[in-house]
Amino acid sequence: MERNVTLIGLFAALIVALGFVPAIPLGFGVPITLQSLGVMLAGAVLGSWRGALAVLLVQALVAIGLPVLAGGRGGLGIFVGPTAGFLIGWLPAAFVTGLIVERLRRVPVALAAGIGATLGGIIIMYALGILGFWLVKNAGLKPEDAPISLWAATAIMAPFIPGDLVKVVVTGLVARTIAQYRPSALLARG
């Protein structure tokens, strides 16, 4: 139990620390950050429940106003802004990433982590992120404002995909390295 709490806290700290790497703003409210890499790693290394708890801890820190997101952002307002869907999507992203690594035991760990990070860290996170972005952008429109279509919201997110694919590869490589040199630390396979 104590080890689990320590590792959950450690991965929450990793996600926060990755937020200190300067974000790359793209001009429409959703920056490129490395924090989603931390989410993918939490799931791949800690497994579904522990990875999700690490993310939940970060989300709680954000909710109480600590500036733990990229760019020093925090507070409840984040949960209704253009990045809300992505932030909310972190939880199922970590869970699904971990679940896939746990279930694909006969598959090499790098591949399992890559598949998990792709499904959890890209497909699920983007589905919720795009939906959240679309909802926020269309909320409270004035009559003269044109609504944004869901397709347009999806197209706006396209520049993020190559970077997130690199994060998937990094997640697989890190998981493989941990499995090779410290297999007991890869709790998703424990």
Image: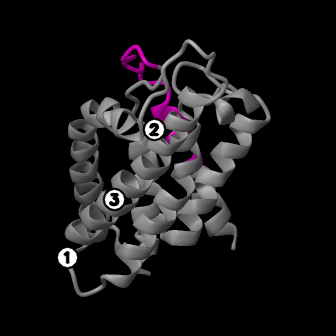
Q: Residue at x 27, y 71 (%)?
A: 112
Q: Nearer the viewer, residue 105 or 136?
A: 136
User: Which tag, 1 or 2, sits closer to the chain's start?
Assistant: 2
Give the crowd class for mark 2: few <14, some 14-19, many >=20 residues within 10 Å.
Answer: many
What secondary structure is found at the residue carrying circle 2? helix
Q: Quadrant of the N terminus?
A: bottom right
Return the x and y of residue 107 as percentages of the image width and height: 21, 81
Q: Alpha-carbon neighbours of circle 3 within 10 Å: few (<14), some, or many (≥20)?
A: many
CA gap, disc 1 and disc 2? 25 Å
Mark 1 and mark 3 lie on one chain; the one further toward the N terminus is: 1
* Magenta residues (range): 11-28
Tell me, for residue 167, which label it has, or none: none
Place of residue 17 in the rendered image (x, y in percent of width and height, measured from the top left)? 51, 33
Q: Is residue 184 above or below residue 41?
A: below
Q: Residue at x 41, y 40 (%)?
A: 150
Give residue 35's mark.
Answer: 2
Residue indicated by mark 1:
108
Is 39 inside the magenta-drawn segment? no
Separation of residues labelled 1 and 3 (CA atoms): 14 Å
Colour mapping used in the image: one colour
Inspect the image, locate mark 2, and give the three-letter code of the amino acid beneath it: Gln
Secondary structure found at label 1: loop
User: Which quadrant would residue 171 be assigned to in this image?
Assistant: bottom left
Name the mark nearer the viewer: 1 or 2.
Answer: 2
Quadrant, the C terminus: bottom left
Q: Position of residue 32 (x, y in %)?
A: 37, 27
Task: Report whether 24 appears left or right of 106.
Answer: right
- Amino acid tagged 3: Ala
Mark earlier in primary sequence (3, 2): 2
Q: Is residue 23 above or below residue 46?
A: above
Q: Residue furthest right?
A: 64
**Residue at which label 3 appears:** 117
